[in-house]
Amino acid sequence: MWAQAAAHYYGIENVFCYSGGTEATAFNPRAVKAMQDAGFSITRTKEGENPVYEVKFAEDAVSIIAFSKKYDDPFNHNKDFAAIMTCSQADENCPLVLGASGRIALTYDDPKEFDGTPQEEVKYAERVHQIGREIFYAFSLVNA
């Protein structure tokens, strides 16, 4: 989400961002809330064990469809893409991302370690903002 928002913000065309992990579960509701608190408009469009969300970050941008899936899910691009590994577990568990032309490790400690603790909301917010800052910085260099 941050990469698509950054590409839009900096006017970098032909960037299409997808997400996926090492397993399909569900978009963590704590992460959904943290992204909403950061300014993303996120609406659940399909219920179930693995809900589907529509994500907006700008009025003039195309919505992002978000749901939990493995990185090789048919919904995602399957060749000539760069894989940005944002979770230390994914970086360790996916030494090879099939179809990726490039692989970039931008790892962080998963805030779910704080689920159910008084620090939960703060840790999710910290991580969301850290990823946003780093992605926006990286995209700021594209036009340099």
Image (spheres, rainbow, N blue to C red):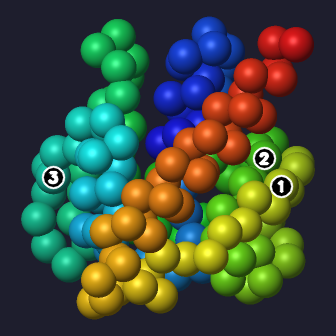
Q: Position of residue 98 (x, y in %)?
A: 79, 65
In the image, 77 versus 67, the foreground residue is: 67
Q: Residue at x 85, y 72 (%)?
A: 96
Which of discs 1 and 2 lies nearer the camera? The answer is 1
- Tell me the CA gap for discs 1 and 3: 30 Å
The image shows a total of numbered marks equal to: 3
| Mark 3 or mark 2, earlier in chain | 3
Secondary structure of the residue carrying tag 2 is strand
Q: What residue sits 69% from the left and 43% below the top? A: 134
Q: Secondary structure at mark 3?
A: strand
Quarter residue 55 falls in? top left
Q: Amino acid at mark 1?
A: Ile
| Mark sitting on residue 63 | none
Q: Give the labeled residue for mark 2.
A: 82
Residue assigned mark 1:
104
Q: Which residue is mark 3?
A: 44
Discs 1, 2 touching: Cβ within 8 Å: yes
- Whichever of labels 1 and 3 marks the residue nearer the N terminus, that label is 3
Q: Nearer the viewer, residue 123 or 69?
A: 123
Q: Earlier in the sequence, mark 1 or mark 2?
A: 2
- What amino acid is labelled 3 in the image? Arg
Determine the residue positioned at 88% across, 50% down.
102
